[in-house]
Image: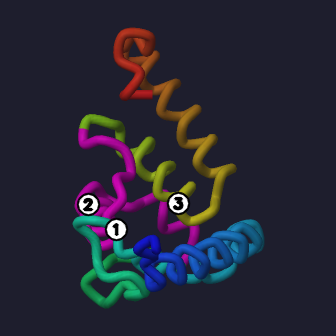
């Protein structure tokens, strides 16, 4: 018999529904629903909600102004990387937006990050992690 982690599966299922709801909330400028931890290595236990020490943004617009430190805290809570520390802050914000369910914001951030890198003279073929 396989070793199934029911708490992890339950948290993943909840987050799938939350992401779907957040897509509508993002488009209608409504308050975001928080994601729960999925019990991934290095993160909080499965099913845990972000507490006051975890800077989960209440509104999609707040994702656009998140700091590297806030993203680092969210990475620690969820056990998920939102880009590498060498990625631009725009890229990392986009990765977190995608985690929330906002694929449009993710692609917008990716495009903006690539534009900034090109303007800075970065060869994206040589350093794709910056895009």
Location of residue 95 in the rendering, given as x and y in whole percent from the top left corner: 48, 50
Asked if residue 81 is positioned above or below residue 121 in the image, the reply reads below
Q: Nearer the viewer, residue 89 or 120?
A: 89
Q: CA distance from mark 1 to mark 2?
A: 15 Å
Crowding around mark 1 (Cα neighbors within 10 Å: few <14, some 14 to 19, many 20+) is some
- Is residue 25 toward the left or the right of residue 106 in the image? right
Residue at horizontal 68 percent and vertical 80 percent from the top: 30
Bounds of the magenta span? 59-85
Residue at horizontal 34 percent and vertical 68 percent from the top: 40
Q: Which residue is mark 2?
A: 72
Asked if residue 51 is positioned above or below residue 115 in the image, the reply reads below
Q: Which residue is mark 3?
A: 99
Residue 68: in sight, yes or no? yes
- Mark 1 lies on a secondary structure that is loop
The answer to which quarter of the image holds residue 75 is: bottom left
Residue 95 is a magenta residue: no
Asked if residue 92 is positioned above or below residue 120 in the image, the reply reads below
The answer to which quarter of the image holds residue 112 is: top right
- Mark 3 lies on a secondary structure that is helix
Asked if residue 96 is positioned above or below residue 55 in the image, the reply reads above
Q: Which mark is residue 40?
A: 1
Q: Earlier in the sequence, mark 3 or mark 2?
A: 2
* Closer to the eye: label 3 or 1: 1
């Amino acid at each position: 018999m396989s070793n199934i982690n029911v708490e992890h599966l339950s948290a993943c299922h909840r987050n799938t529904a939350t992401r779907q709801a957040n897509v509508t909330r993002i488009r209608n400028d409504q308050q975001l629903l928080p994601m729960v931890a999925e019990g991934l290595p290095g993160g909080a236990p499965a099913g845990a909600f972000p507490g006051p020490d975890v800077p989960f943004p209440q509104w999609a617009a707040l994702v656009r102004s998140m700091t590297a430190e806030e993203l680092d805290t969210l990475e620690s809570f969820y056990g998920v990387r939102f880009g590498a520390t060498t990625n631009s802050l725009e890229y990392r914000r986009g990765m977190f937006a995608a985690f929330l369910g906002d694929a449009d914001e993710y692609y917008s951030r990716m495009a903006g990050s690539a534009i900034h890198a090109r303007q800075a003279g970065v060869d994206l073929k040589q350093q794709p992690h910056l895009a």
